[in-house]
């Protein structure tokens, strides 16, 4: 069923509204006739309302009900919008699941490494602030934020006795610590590998301890060899 909502009632089988008086509330100022075509998406055995196709006119116009079933352009628009919204919901769920997993890893890290409470969140914020000063795009800033959150998750794979050793590390222990960017890269790759837009984040994470003079780790690359 298609519904039309007015100020006084709700009518079935009406999809067009004509605004003649000031108390009427069109979606956009100055619109005289509006059409709301609901868009449904299959969810199991039911159909879920996910949005509507909105048509508005600054003149009074009639909209024949048969147009929904007969007009090819309207049907193609409804189909395209339905597909886009479905893809958007899937992507949103992917990002939501990813954020949840990142929070799990950062929480584990916070309890495993006593010297780094909230460190991942602080680094993430610093990354964003620096990125804003550099004039990076919103998409690049989002990647920096995630990279900041993930940069040390590889430490969850390192023995806590080494992470929290009160004295100086031995050369062997320091070499183990220096492996954490590789662990962070591996975990990030597993978390993000299926999301194309975020596929470069693991490389950011992998190189976060490299130095411009080549004295960093884990690979010792230098200068412009290091990703921005």
Image (cartoon, rainbow, N blue to C red):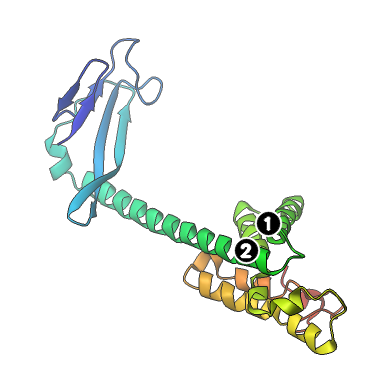
Please name whichever residue, 43 or 156, is drawn nearer the observer in this view of the structure: 156
Other-residue count near label 2 (Cα within 10 Å), few / some / many at <14 / 14–19 / ≥20: many
Image quadrant assignment for residue 136: bottom right
Residue at 29% x, 39% y is 52
Please name whichever residue, 23 or 164, is drawn nearer the observer in this view of the structure: 164
Residue 25, how many percent across, how many down? Answer: 35, 19
Foreground mark, 2 or 1, reads 2
Image quadrant assignment for residue 202: bottom right
Residue 49, how many percent across, how many down? Answer: 26, 43
Residue at 34% x, 22% y is 26
| 177 left or right of 39 in image | right
Would you say residue 73 is visible in this rendering?
no
Establish if 100 lies above or below 40. Answer: below
Q: Mark 2–mark 1 contact, CB under 8 Å?
A: yes
| 11 left or right of 130 in image | left
Establish if 30 lies above or below 75. Answer: above
Q: Marks 2 and 1, how far apart in space?
A: 8 Å
Image quadrant assignment for residue 14: top left
For the N terminus, give its image quadrant. top left
Please name whichever residue, 197 or 71, is drawn nearer the observer in this view of the structure: 197
State the residue lying farthest toward the bottom.
172
Give the labeled residue for mark 1: 121
Disc nearer the start of the sequence (2/1) = 2
For the C terminus, give its image quadrant. bottom right
Q: Any mark on residue 1, and which?
A: none
Residue at 53% x, 59% y is 99
At mark 2, the secondary structure is helix
| 42 left or right of 204 in image | left
Q: Any mark on residue 106, and which?
A: 2
Residue 145, how many percent across, how many down? Answer: 64, 58
Residue 28, how many percent across, how many down? Answer: 39, 25
């Amino acid at each position: 069923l298609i519904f039309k909502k007015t100020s006084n009632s709700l009518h079935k089988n009406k999809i067009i509204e004509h605004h003649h008086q000031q108390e009427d509330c069109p979606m956009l100022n100055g619109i005289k006739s509006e059409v709301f075509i609901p868009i449904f998406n299959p969810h199991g055995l039911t159909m879920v309302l996910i949005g509507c196709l909105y048509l508005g006119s600054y003149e009074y116009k009639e909209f024949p009900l048969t147009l929904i079933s007969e007009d090819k352009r309207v049907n193609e628009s409804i189909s395209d919008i339905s597909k886009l919204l479905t893809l958007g919901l899937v992507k949103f769920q992917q990002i939501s699941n990813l954020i949840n997993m990142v929070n799990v890893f950062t929480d584990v890290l916070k309890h495993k490494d006593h010297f780094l409470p909230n460190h991942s969140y602080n680094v993430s914020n610093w990354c964003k602030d620096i990125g804003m000063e550099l004039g990076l795009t919103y998409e690049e800033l989002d990647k920096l934020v995630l990279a900041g959150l993930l940069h040390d998750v590889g430490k969850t794979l390192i023995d806590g006795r080494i992470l929290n050793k009160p004295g100086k590390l031995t050369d062997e222990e320091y070499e183990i610590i220096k492996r954490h960017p590789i662990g962070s890269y591996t975990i990030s790759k597993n978390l993000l590998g299926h999301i194309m837009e975020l596929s470069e984040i693991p490389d950011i994470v992998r190189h976060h301890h490299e130095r411009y003079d080549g004295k960093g780790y884990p690979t010792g690359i230098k200068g412009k060899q290091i990703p921005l």
